[in-house]
Amino acid sequence: MHISPYEALDVVEGDNSTVYAALSRGLLEYDIESGEQSIRTAADYLSDISPTALGYDANSKTVLIGYNNGNLDFLQGEKIINLPAILQSSINGVKRINQIVCKGNSAYLATGFGIVVINLSKLEVRDTYNPTTLDESIVDITFLNDSIYALTEGGLYVGAENNNFLADPGQWSKINTVIDYTGSGGVYNAIESYQNSLFLSYKDPLYNGDTLFRNIGSQWNAFLDGVELNSLNVSSNLLLVSTETGVVVFTSDLSQQQNVFQYENTVFPSPNNAVRVGEYFYIADDASGLVRARNAFESSQIIFEGPRYNLAYRADWNDGKLAISSGGVNGTSPAFKQEGGYTRQDESWVSVNPYNQAILQGKNIWDFISVSINPSNSEEVAFGTYSELPLVIMKGGSITDTFGYSNSLLTSLGGSGSSGVGKITDVTFDDNSNLWVANAESERPLKVRDENGGWYDFDMGNQVKNKGTRRLVVDNNDVKWMAVDNLGLVAFDHGESIGDASDDRYQIFTTSANSGDLPTSTVEAIAVDFDNNIWIGTPEGMRVLYNTSNVFDASSGEYNFQKLLIEFGENVEIVLGTTQITDIEIDGANRKWIGTANSGVFLLEPDGLEVVQNFTAENSPLLNNNILDITIDHNNGEVYFVTNDGLISYRSDASQGDNNYTNVKVFPNPVRPDYFGPVTIQGIAYNSDVKITDIAGNLVYQTISNGGTATWNGQTLQGERVQTGVYLIWTSIDDQDVKGRKVGKVVFIN
């Protein structure tokens, strides 16, 4: 998983000077003495994706991790134990774990439907409490004087801690002295016991209208008001009040000790929770991640390399750089997300958005929904948006150019006016640094900014005008393929010159039996394989067009997309049937990676007739079965999957071939006794015949590479693990211009 270190939701103090922070997509463990960090995610450790609450039991030295869907993990040292009882229960309603409070041998979980009590010795559910007969979420829990208090957004309930019948709402009492804000739009969001008093946080709909109440007898007096309250916590015998502008600290005499009202470089805090360990506060901040602060003038971030935000929508890779557009759409409308876009190169992430780019500030820009990296200059990245500023260019880590209606041929939805929202559904650079743009609902939706900065648009007939657009790709013959809503697909060739319209040609593909034979008029995915075949994905399955070189000269019925058929005895089936396809990408072995709307990811053989792998959220760490986009690092075969829950990647066994063998890698090397995974040979010629011999020249293993990558399981042809020694790797290919050679060696230690 590629997760943001900047979105911290909760924090607890563990044992042996360790602090744990719940990030929106993982868990950060920080060793105070050594300064070491450990990042745990659902890809390699945790049982789920989105932590919402943490708890710590000092007796068993267990960190409890609650999730948005009710799942629960116990972290004990390096061991993780999962308890999916809430997740898998038949209980109706929200199962989200809002807070975790450990007391004695039990952990009390405030959830969307009640209080779940966990036996910490047996790590199992002991009981479920129902403080109210109403359908109310329990947002927080505290204990005081042998009583347990359960807070809902609307009020406070109390029961006897030693009552064995708290599953019965009749055993609870609502505290009627708490002000009833029903109908005002405000809610209660936190409760804490401190110095034999209850402190209750009320969140008002008006900004800075929140109030922290203190209970004295039957009275609830305002203790702190005129703030934005996020949470309460007692740590190191201090009351820590996390507000939208800092952490306010109160001592045992209820006097304010200090206020951490800023971080380093005068960054303003947005804390979700805080603890005090030694001389420092450790703050889970919504925008700065885990922050270590002595006071408002001495602080530092405890973060790691990662994207600024977890939101992702589209992705592109080229020349060692990954680029992500992190906007979105709400049906056919903008989602108004301002997370912008980001890039990753050499493990370093750079984010651009309206908050950190001066050129974008004050502009009505949101929803970066398309992205392309210039193959001739990876420093140049184009982002298409769904906003009033449709196109921006990033160079050298900053936005340098913006294009709207006055300095380009881009148009707003439904016309060519000088204002309004424009929708750039896709952008793609060709090999000559021309930037092609799919401009939805335009008279001429296909546009280009050439390498010299000139703008052109193209007439492709009345059928294409003023319709929505989707994907746009450039094939191996420089033909542009663009998906058009309620029509199908259009192919366009600008001829010898972009600026000369006299030799322009186009072909339209529809659902007509003689004009494309598409399964639907909506095309969601387009890909070009090594043979210049065009693969498309639709809400009703996948199709392929084989003879693309003659598409402009073909007669009616001669340019239809074909179904992929497999015979099973007397039955014939269509590959992937009517599965909704969201993206198709081609890897270095010409295999097809297929993203779907609800079935995860399929990897198909080059001809598309055999499924190599199917990753789902159920059988792999894939975050979500709804795949928004896929892109591939062709240098090493890493495949990036964009989902609603973020970005995750998988190291595949295929990469682009390199006939020059300029950067051959063999890893791991040496192979140690405790390693039983594959040995990978990368950077060799496309589809090489790979032979592995011992030092005397005896053949040990033989295989064919996937593109430029081959793998060896460390066994002989007879299936036995090889002996300790040095093994040589040789390649050859059926090409008179590419000679076979020794490309590497690997050492085995048993």
Image (cartoon, rainbow, N blue to C red):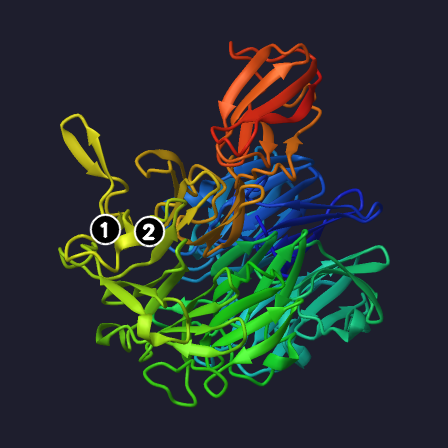
Q: Secondary structure at mark 2?
A: strand
Q: Position of residue 506 (x, y in %)?
A: 28, 66
Q: Is residue 8 above or below residue 443?
A: above
In the image, is 474 to the left or to the right of 660?
left
Q: Which residue is mark 1?
A: 561
Using the image as rendered, state which of residue 293 and residue 248 is in the foreground.
Answer: 293
The quadrant in which residue 747 appears is: top right
The amino acid type of the residue labelled 1 equals Phe
Q: Position of residue 212 (x, y in %)?
A: 65, 74
Crowding near the residue tagged with mark 1, few <14, some 14–19, many ≥20 C-alpha atoms within 10 Å: many
Asked if disc 1 and disc 2 are in contact, CB closer than 8 Å, the reply is yes
Mark 1 or 2, nearer chain start:
2
Q: Is residue 5 above or below residue 386?
A: above
The amino acid type of the residue labelled 2 equals Ile
The quadrant in which residue 144 appears is: bottom right
Using the image as rendered, state which of residue 400 and residue 42 is in the foreground.
Answer: 400
Q: Position of residue 173 (x, y in %)?
A: 49, 62
Residue furthest bottom in the image: 418
Give the residue at x 41% y 70%: 497
Q: Quadrant of the C terminus?
A: top right
Using the image as rendered, state which of residue 592 and residue 623 is in the foreground.
Answer: 592
Q: Which residue is mark 2?
A: 534
Q: On residue 690, which mark appears?
A: none
